């Protein structure tokens, strides 16, 4: 989905100690750059028919992948007002190219797109204690990378993530440390005042697209879903096809220092997945499309017996499953780990062919 190496920046907050909410909010993205006057997009080569943006079906839904700034530039080119494009050839060839461009533009406007915003490209606006909700900052642009930004209309409600205060605090620290990303499913916003699909700034060096957010999710450095935003027509964990071959797997566990465990120690945590398997199979009887991740923190006692277990965070939005997994973990032994060792184990719940 994205390169975890990009996310592995120098830690700003210690993973073993939660940053305070105020400090973490202070780590938010700096205010956006002042915008230079909008200019025309860079000239387009019309010696051959313009190509549509790369199409790569990807979950959720049938959204087209926008993996990097170049892909967003390609999408913006596809959304250009046809009246600004000079088509070459004889009158028949120009008329045919114009019709084809209009069809592609219409299809591009109607489609949904999915992209991943790195930790440095987004921040959170506030934490609403009364609603236990961490709100995404949509007052500033969401940056895919250099020269490519998305922005949301000020009239649109900002997505929020339902999280207990301690979990919200931890996620704020994870974002500040560069170990988180934001996955967006969006559609280009339609505007009666602006015919072109994007703004081209700084002589065409920066492209900005106004979007409507259809769904949002927070991802860890391995691409596992940590939390889904409320609302959104593609954000429901019950959406999607039913799980056919349910499987629980352990994904890159970490020690208390935030470092990945060595492969032998990571392999020793597999009994946690086995213990959680029955919990998953039971919940699928009533929520057949449920997928997601539970980050389970455990402390190992004598003989590998688990003395303590609790859920650090979960994207399943199901308290009963979390309680079942914790109960099952406390009955499990991990003989490959030493007494007193603490680990955080992300357990991914999905179909076997999706792991």
Image: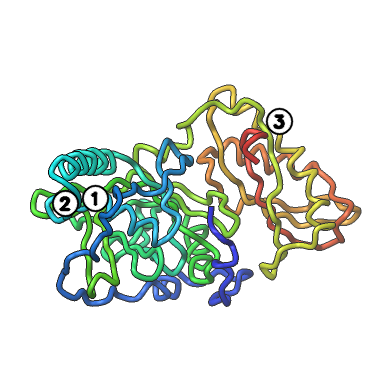
In the rendered structure, find residue 79 and report the number of the disc placed on it: 1
Residue at horizontal 71 percent and vertical 57 percent from the top: 253
**Marks 3 and 1 in Cβ contact (< 8 Å):** no
Mark in the foreground, 3 or 1: 1
Q: What is the count of numbered marks? A: 3
The residue at the far front in this view is 90
Q: Can you give x and y, in whole percent of width and height, for residue 288 in the image?
A: 55, 26
The residue at the far top in this view is 285
Q: Residues within 10 Å of mark 3 (few under 14, many from 20)?
A: some
- Disc 2 versus disc 3: distance between alpha carbons? 55 Å
Q: Can you give x and y, in whole percent of width and height, for residue 173 in the image?
A: 51, 68
- Disc 3 versus disc 1: distance between alpha carbons? 49 Å
Instruction: Give the residue at mark 2.
Output: 81
Name the element at disc 1: loop
- Nearer-the-camera pick, 81 or 282: 81
Q: Can you give x and y, in whole percent of width and height, for residue 309 in the image?
A: 70, 51
Q: Is residue 52 left or right of residue 289?
A: left
Q: Does 261 sit above or below residue 214?
A: below
- Nearer-the-camera pick, 139 or 90: 90
In the rendered structure, find residue 230 and report the number of the disc placed on it: none
């Amino acid at each position: 989905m994205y390169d975890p190496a990009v996310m592995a920046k120098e830690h700003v907050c210690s993973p073993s100690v939660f940053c305070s909410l105020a400090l973490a909010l202070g780590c938010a993205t700096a205010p956006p750059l002042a915008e230079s006057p909008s200019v025309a997009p860079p000239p387009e080569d019309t010696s051959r028919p313009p190509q549509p943006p790369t199409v790569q079906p990807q979950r959720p839904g049938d959204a087209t992948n926008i993996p990097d700034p170049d892909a967003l530039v390609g999408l913006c080119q596809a959304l250009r007002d046809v009246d600004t494009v000079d088509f070459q050839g004889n009158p028949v060839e120009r008329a045919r190219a114009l019709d084809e461009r209009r069809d592609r533009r219409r299809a591009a406007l109607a489609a949904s797109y999915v992209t991943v915003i790195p930790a440095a490209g987004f921040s959170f606006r506030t934490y609403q204690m009364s609603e236990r909700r961490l709100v995404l900052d949509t007052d500033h642009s969401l940056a895919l990378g250099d020269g490519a930004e998305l922005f949301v209309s000020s009239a649109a409600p900002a997505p929020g993530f339902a999280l207990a205060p301690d979990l919200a605090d931890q996620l704020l620290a994870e974002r500040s440390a560069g170990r988180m990303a934001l996955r967006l499913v969006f559609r280009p916003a339609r505007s009666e005042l602006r015919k072109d699909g994007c703004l081209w700034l700084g002589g065409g060096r920066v492209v900005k697209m106004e979007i409507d957010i259809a769904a949002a999710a927070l991802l860890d450095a391995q691409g596992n879903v940590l939390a889904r935003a409320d609302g959104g027509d593609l954000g429901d964990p019950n959406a999607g096809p039913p799980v056919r071959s349910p499987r629980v797997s352990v994904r890159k566990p970490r020690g208390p220092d935030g470092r990945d465990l060595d492969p032998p120690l990571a392999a020793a945590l597999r009994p946690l997945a086995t213990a959680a398997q029955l919990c998953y199979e039971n919940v699928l009887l009533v929520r057949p499309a449920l997928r997601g991740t539970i980050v389970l923190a455990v402390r190992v006692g004598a003989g590998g017996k688990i003395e303590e277990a609790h859920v650090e965070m979960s994207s399943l939005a199901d308290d009963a499953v979390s309680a079942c997994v914790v109960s099952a973990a406390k009955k499990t032994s991990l003989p490959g780990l030493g007494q007193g060792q603490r680990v955080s184990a992300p357990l991914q719940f999905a179909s076997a062919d999706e792991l």
